[in-house]
Image: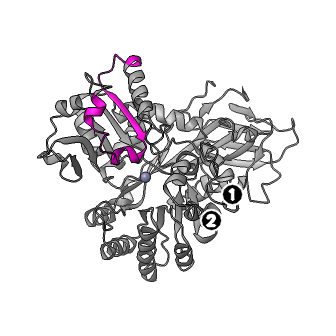
Amino acid sequence: MTTYDSKDSRNLILLTNCEIYTKDPTIAGCNNILIAGNKISDIFYAPPGKHTVPERCIEIDCFRNLVIPGINDAHIHLLSSAAVMNQHSMHSIHSKDYEMIAKTLTSIKTKHNQSEWIGAYGLDDRFFLDQNFDSQWLDKFALNKPAFISNETGHAIILNSKAMQMLNISQTDDSLLHGVIDVAGNGQLTGKFFDLNSAIFHKINAFTNQFNADNNLPKLFTQLHQKGITSVQDAGHNNKIDKLQRLSLITDVNAIRIGLMIGCNIQNINDLASIHQEIDTNMVKFIGLKIMLSEATGDYLPAKSELEYLVELSNSKNFRVAVHAVEEQAIDMTLDAFSSAHKFYPDIINRIEHCSEYTHSVIEKSKTIPFYSVTQPGFILHRGDYYIEAHPKDKHNDLYPLRTMQETSHVLAFSSDSPVIPPDPWDGFISAQSRNTLRGNRLGTSNERLAFDEIVDCYTTNGAIVEGSQDIKGTLAVGFLADLAILDASCIGSSNPTLLTILNGNIVWDSEALVLTLH
Ligand SMILES: [Zn+2]
């Protein structure tokens, strides 16, 4: 690593010999980028070896590797992603493969006998619908230690008997009113809980520090830097206004840029309208209001009229709304709500998160109203086999048709939705380029694949647009923030191509593959 003093804002970095990712013809032939402080101060051409390096400047010879704007993961759950870092992934276990769960639990137990709890996440949703999957089944493999497993989307969790006993869980528990406690025919709790994960984690965190998100955040930030990520957008629909300050306190200039969404309700809209001018900090910024539109109880909540009201009220205060909408009907409702708000507030473009079932009727409606789509190409790789099993073949073309989404939404931006899948944009590249799944199937037609440049845009420039930061980042240009990644593009598809990452003018990840010289 370099002996770069990150506190010295006057520090200079000169990238030489680089291939610059740009659409600007005046920059296209350039091969040098000069960074001063936290901004890009010059982009120019010099014949190789003929550039002059300022004093006290770190020169990075890029060996003709590609320099792109720092990657922006436009939809992530930061604290949950940090919390699962001490849990075991069960993503790769196929539905019905109970033997594999048993094997995994047994190996966790032997490997981690020092820790009190056994925690796992990412298990196929379908296990949670099976009556035989209950706390007593779990007890067979984790009897003396408290254990939990949450599902892929983080909406369901199962506890073993020991955990239920330690957490003192009963049907009359006041803190568990807002979700579903599963009860068997004999009146006994099955150990399964739906839409209660955060309430249960709250209880677990009172017992143990093992899954405390704050402790893991620095490790998570390093992982993101290693992948070339310099910005994320936190999409928690329960985020409160005080989270802005909390995140500001635990991030520093080398951490990550965070665009924070805040839960969309009347109280938050009004509170934000009076204070939002003052709440942004250097690295943490309020970017919009989040609505979770889901069908947990059979009807969509919020109902259509409330959804329309919330979108309009938010837009009237000049705030963008981001609606979680996965199914065709949810997307349809959302587009209607956007459409009515748009008549009064045409300057605001709202966003749809996931936008998964992009059917013919969605496509037709999408042409009538501008909106941003923020989706997850990596779901094709990680969850594609599940989609192929769970949906009839004639529906496969409707799932994440990336090219159609790009053509019919105002802007398409990419993200991971971590911890649902790992926060790895390079998985997203593979998915978007090939539409291949982990088991080698292909989801939908190859017409919906995107080219390399289009994918880079979805992860950089477009990510900045959907959060409203396109004037300061997301593009390599003079005066823009010095957030960038140097890539060995030939590695994409086989390994992480990130050679070096610069965030806010500081080197935050260095693979040591490039030569750095201090002048
Ligand atoms: Zn999400």
Q: Position of residue 154 (x, y in %)?
A: 37, 46
Q: Is residue 125 magenta?
A: yes
Crowdedness near tag 2: few (<14), some (14–19) or many (≥20) residues, C-alpha within 10 Å? some
Disc 2 and disc 1 in contact, CB within 8 angstroms: yes
Query: In terms of secondary structure, where does tag 1 sit?
Result: loop
- Quarter of the image where one finds residue 503: top right
Q: Position of residue 451 (x, y in %)?
A: 72, 56
Query: In terms of secondary structure, where does tag 2 sit?
Result: helix
Q: Position of residue 58 (x, y in %)?
A: 69, 31
Q: Which residue is mark 1?
A: 450
Side of 277 relative to 467 (left or right): left
Query: For the residues marked 2 and 1, what is the alpha-carbon distance in whole angstroms?
Result: 9 Å
Upstream in the sequence, badge 2 or badge 1? 2
Q: Is residue 255 above or below residue 436?
A: above
Does the rendering let one see residue 210?
no
Amino acid found under the numbered disc labelled 2 = Gln
Crowdedness near tag 1: few (<14), some (14–19) or many (≥20) residues, C-alpha within 10 Å? some
Residue depicted at 74% across the width and 42% down the height:
489
Residue depicted at 60% across the width and 44% down the height:
427
Q: Position of residue 340 (x, y in %)?
A: 42, 81
Does the rendering let one see residue 355?
yes
Q: Quadrant of the N terminus?
A: top right
Residue depicted at 73% across the width and 33% down the height:
60
Q: Which residue is mark 2?
A: 406
Q: Which residues are magenta?
A: 110-139
User: Quick one: 255 or 56, which is closer to the camera?
Assistant: 255
